[in-house]
Amino acid sequence: MAKLKELAEWVGAQLVGDENIEIARVAPIEEAGPGDLTFLANPRYAAKLNDCRAAAVIVAPGVESERHSLLICSNPYLAFARILARLCPPASVERRVMDGAWVDPSAQLGKEVAIHPGCHVGPNVRIGRGTILYPGVVLYEGAQIGEDCVLHAHVIVREACRIGNRVIIQPGAVIGSDGFGYAPDGRRYVKIPQIGIVEIGDDVEIGAATCIDRAALTVTRIGRGTKIDNLVQIAHNVEIGEDTIIVSQVGISGSTRIGDHCTFGGQAGIAGHVRIGDDVMIAARGGVPSDVPPGQVMSGTPVMPHKDWLKASMTFPKLPEMRRDVQALKKRLVELENLIKEK
Amino acid sequence: MAKLKELAEWVGAQLVGDENIEIARVAPIEEAGPGDLTFLANPRYAAKLNDCRAAAVIVAPGVESERHSLLICSNPYLAFARILARLCPPASVERRVMDGAWVDPSAQLGKEVAIHPGCHVGPNVRIGRGTILYPGVVLYEGAQIGEDCVLHAHVIVREACRIGNRVIIQPGAVIGSDGFGYAPDGRRYVKIPQIGIVEIGDDVEIGAATCIDRAALTVTRIGRGTKIDNLVQIAHNVEIGEDTIIVSQVGISGSTRIGDHCTFGGQAGIAGHVRIGDDVMIAARGGVPSDVPPGQVMSGTPVMPHKDWLKASMTFPKLPEMRRDVQALKKRLVELENLIKEK
Amino acid sequence: MAKLKELAEWVGAQLVGDENIEIARVAPIEEAGPGDLTFLANPRYAAKLNDCRAAAVIVAPGVESERHSLLICSNPYLAFARILARLCPPASVERRVMDGAWVDPSAQLGKEVAIHPGCHVGPNVRIGRGTILYPGVVLYEGAQIGEDCVLHAHVIVREACRIGNRVIIQPGAVIGSDGFGYAPDGRRYVKIPQIGIVEIGDDVEIGAATCIDRAALTVTRIGRGTKIDNLVQIAHNVEIGEDTIIVSQVGISGSTRIGDHCTFGGQAGIAGHVRIGDDVMIAARGGVPSDVPPGQVMSGTPVMPHKDWLKASMTFPKLPEMRRDVQALKKRLVELENLIKEK
């Protein structure tokens, strides 16, 4: 519960309308009711305000409404995120090691750490101040977790892996599983011990059931601010830059290096030992077999420039017709050639 | 163990043969031995009965066999499912809160609930009568589970999510993880708190390690009777209708709405904000970028009618040959054109 | 820590250089420093030795270096794997049932078994000598685990499934979840009880969050020595041979049979009821709709011989241009035909 005035100050927005409205809830524009705050991320949809019953709306400069109080700011979506975080803080959690948690005596715990029942904190683990472990989190020997992290239920961090500050890990994610490496011995395969680690930067978020493998000898690295969705596979020795977005079910093969501020759409796949520059966008389901220079927008398998893919994939269903055309052309051309020879 | 007569009554089948046979086991048609019951789902394979050593066979009307007692019914596969459920009931489980389970005092448990060691039931959770939690299930604050559900080991249901009655959740599935939503702030990304929930209807089944994200503000919804396989990703704000089949490794992006009685083959991917009508079939690995009207059968990426895709994908390997043909045609046509000009 | 001489003997390599060097670490060729051992798997990259600061290098016969001591052997990568296993043995684990583990009194535990807190060992489970269960492993009733296995945190093995000897299972993998089988009853679906099991051979490795479903009536089988990466789906009744490699995010549909010594690249998908011969390679993202004879190398969806796919997929972006060419050819041919008729 907050006054609209306070929220405007909170995000540095210009307030037009009734500054004393009490805002209890943030709701989507179609579902907001009296007393609610909503937002209009894209001015093109301003017509939606006509039917919107919200008390107040976060808008970009230039949007007007007689029916609503307005919070005007240059980035309404960002203001929405920040107001939501203020109005709906996460549930408070008791800051202590709860009964039914196993913590090795050699582990070092920061202040205000919360460790739920069923957690297992191994020898020589370090956990920074303010970090929360939900039930069933397992930290193997020597794992290091930074400050103000949230590790949801059943997250596993294996031996010696290092997690930065303010990292959020959704339930069931696995950090530091063995990389997939074998040496052929005739027709059989011998496991190559995976003795490296995973290192995750500050402000990273990792999705549910996502797996990040430890390096064979060195470090699998996820850069600061990178956000990874659910069920993503990141193989051993991969290095990912900062502020990169990886949508669900993407797979990144071993030793690949990815730049800053890239975006990978859902179910994309990247081959091993590939370099992808900064600011690359790979569309959903794109398959990347080789290096991609910075700034490219790519689609398809194997990937090509997105515009080319759009045209080629629209032509694809016409392939059988094209083939018939080509066969017919060949036949008619032969007839024509014979006709001319005869003349 | 049951007499064939009882089984016939159980599924309303017509019995031809020895009604007093004791059936101990149901086995596939190739592996069944004396004393076993088997089934012939498709009358086209009736020849298989010649070598079948089973004592009795569930068949559709019109199938005959002198060697076997027959249970004749209109839907043999359904009768097989029901007889199997009768002959092989799930292992019985002690109905109590077992030692080593943590249950918050504010949680409300129905009668005959089984809660295994290592489970964690948070504050204000409600669990309906007859529900079984296998070891390591974690229910966050305010989660609601219906009656006669089975939540297998390490299933996680996060804050305030609601599960209907008779829902089966395979091991390691995650219900209510945060949706993947961020607001750009320059080149960085700011998390949008995901304060919505997941709501799952009656008689839904959810596969192992499948992830269903909570809505940003509202509800991610799975309709009654829908069956979801392993390792499926369902993003925030998705709504899925009733009796829809979603095979393994499918990904459904945010805010997409799917109708009733659809089927999604394995590894299919659906873009965000898309509407898919009732009775749609998307073949395995289909990529759906936009709306699909009811009743369509689609394949490919991007999807097209399945018949078109079959033809186009058969032509695809001939592309290089077609290209050579086109180049040759161009050359010969130029020659011909020159020849005619000369004449 | 070991002398180079000992390591040479360990792997049967010929030693050229200083046999008394103390090796503490194995490092990649680019990062190795004084005192380190590295390896050159491929003689083509021998030039890398010029800048390599390692004390010693494992090489194939014919590679020379004046700067390094050399371990010369026919399979340097295999020697590297074996030396690494010797120099970096896994962390030692207390061999006992630790406090906070629940073990049913009817379970049979071999000698030197380690069972961590939070594990749950159900009735009639058998665990072979020397096997390690990390925290949170759940073994349902009647599960059988062989000798010298490592089951990482939160691995789940459901009822009556059988695991061989020396099997390694990465965190969060699920063995024996219900197969995805339903009988249609009008528009609804009725669950077919999945009463079969999973059987896993010796020396198999299974990746994090991989799911292997139990058979409907019989056995889902993974052959000796097969290695499975993270987030792989293996459906009910699948049978996989020996020494087969399955990379991350592959999906194998129900009742499919796969031979020995195959390789499936990441994100490949195999339809149900398909037979794949020995020594087949399916490239990453390949989609297999039907049987594949032994020894084939296949790519694409649907798969075709890899060489054909390379050519066809290189031509694909030229489709729009080809289509324009065909249209233009048709027009010019008509003009030519008319011209000739007139003459």
Image (tube, coloured by chain):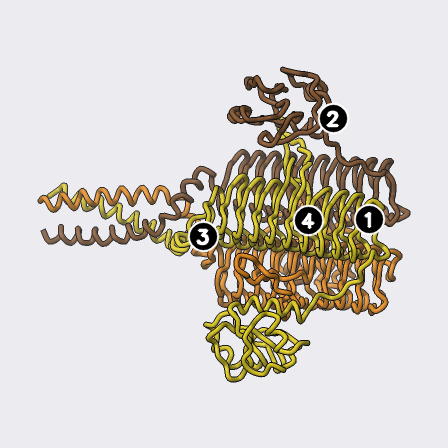
Chain colours: A orange, B brown, C yellow
Q: Which residue is mark 2?
A: B1
Element under label 1?
loop
Mark 3 closeness class: few <14, some 14–19, many ≥20 residues within 10 Å? some
Q: Chain of mark 2?
A: B
Give above or below for C212 relative to A268: above
- Which amino acid type corresponds to the residue marked 3 in the rendered image? Val
Give above or below for A61 relative to B211: below
**How many angstroms separate mark 1 from mark 2 (CA)?**
34 Å
Q: Nearer the viewer, mark 4 or mark 3?
A: 4
Q: Nearer the viewer, mark 3 or mark 2?
A: 2
Q: Which residue is mark 3?
A: C297
Where does the image place residue A51, in percent across and percent down from the top left? 66, 44
Nearer-N-terminus badge (1/2): 2
Q: Which residue is mark 4?
A: C163
**How many angstroms separate mark 1 from mark 4 (CA)?**
25 Å
- Which amino acid type corresponds to the residue marked 2 in the rendered image? Met
Q: Is residue B90 left or right of residue C220?
A: right
Q: Chain of mark 3?
A: C
Q: Are marks 1 and 4 on the same chain?
A: no
Element under label 2?
loop
Where does the image place residue A210, in percent across and percent down from the top left? 66, 56
Q: Is residue C303 left or right of residue C95?
A: left
Q: Chain of mark 1?
A: B
Mark 2 closeness class: few <14, some 14–19, many ≥20 residues within 10 Å? few
Are discs 4 and 3 less than 8 Å apart at CB?
A: no
Q: Nearer the viewer, mark 3 or mark 1?
A: 3
In the orientation shown, which residue stands out farthest toward the right? B105
**How many angstroms separate mark 3 from mark 1 (CA)?**
47 Å
Where does the image place residue A266, in percent across and percent down from the top left? 58, 53
